[in-house]
Amino acid sequence: MLTAEALAVFRGERLVFRDLEFSVPAGGALVLAGANGSGKSTLLRLLAGLVRPVAGRLLWRGEDALADLAEHGRRIAYVGHLDAVKPGLTVSENLRLAARMAGRPVGGALAALALQPLADLPARMLSAGQKRRLALSRLVLSDAPLWLLDEPTLGLDTASIERFGALLAAHRAGGGMVVAATHVPLPLPDAASFRLG
């Protein structure tokens, strides 16, 4: 469903990578590995349509995925390095816009990563791991088939990683795809691996 053909990207004057080729089928997962600065985050940004390749093509079901960026934006859910949490809003309020856009209640997102006890707490009072759980809980509210995740388990405890693993498994069981950059093992059984650098 998602196919990369001979992708190449520059950052400034530096060639980050070239000739990258891979595919991720429905229900599949791809784990991006490599040293810091090897291009994992840049590749995720390219897959999200935030960076354009200087060569190669990104295909969605055989068609140019980046030809219509608005349409491509509806296909992806992106969780980057930053948690995109507004500190002055409560946990529930941080999820409300995504819930409204999805036509779903906030409760499912809170439950997925055990955030119910924190629902009325201002986000500025959350620990780093709790903020990460809040960012990841937005995935529950998305219908996007492609999840792009940059170091998704950063700051998570063991119980939270297990809950996140269940979320990933349910997404894949429904035909969803996951591409994740990481330095640590992720709860993605049978995922393909791609090393950059």
Image (spheres, helix red, strand yellow):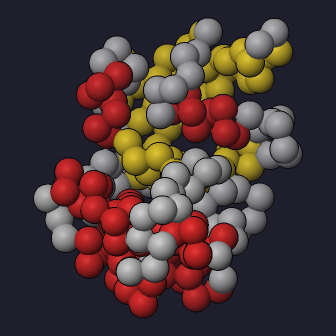
Residue at 66 percent of width and 17 percent of height: 8
183 in relation to 197, above or below: below
Q: Which of 160 and 23 lies nearest the eye of the viewer?
A: 160
User: Residue 108's spot in the image, x, y percent?
Assistant: 27, 76
In the depicted structure, whether residue 169 falls above or below residue 85: below
Query: Is 2 situated above or below 190?
Result: above
Looking at the image, residue 53 sits to the left or right of residue 33; the answer is: left
Q: Which residue lies furthest to the left in this view?
A: 103
Expressed as whole percent of the image width and height from the top left, the position of residue 186 reads 63, 68
Q: Nearer the viewer, residue 107 or 23?
A: 107
- Location of the C terminus (image quadrant): top right
Is 27 rendered above or below residue 25?
Answer: below
x and y percentages locating residue 187 in the rendered image: 58, 72
Tell me the quarter of the image containing the N terminus: top left
**Which residue sits at x=65%, y=85%?**
158
Instruction: Give the quadrant of residue 90.
Output: bottom left
Using the rendered image of the protein, determine whether residue 151 is visible from the camera's viewpoint: yes
- Front residue of 159/5: it is 159
| Number of numbered markers | 0
Question: Does any portion of residue 172 appear in the rendered image?
Answer: no
- Tell me what residue is drawn at x 60 percent, y 10 percent: 55
Extreme front residue here? 88
Q: Residue at x 28, y 38 (%)?
A: 74
Residue 157 is situated, as x and y percent measured from the top left of the image, at 66, 83
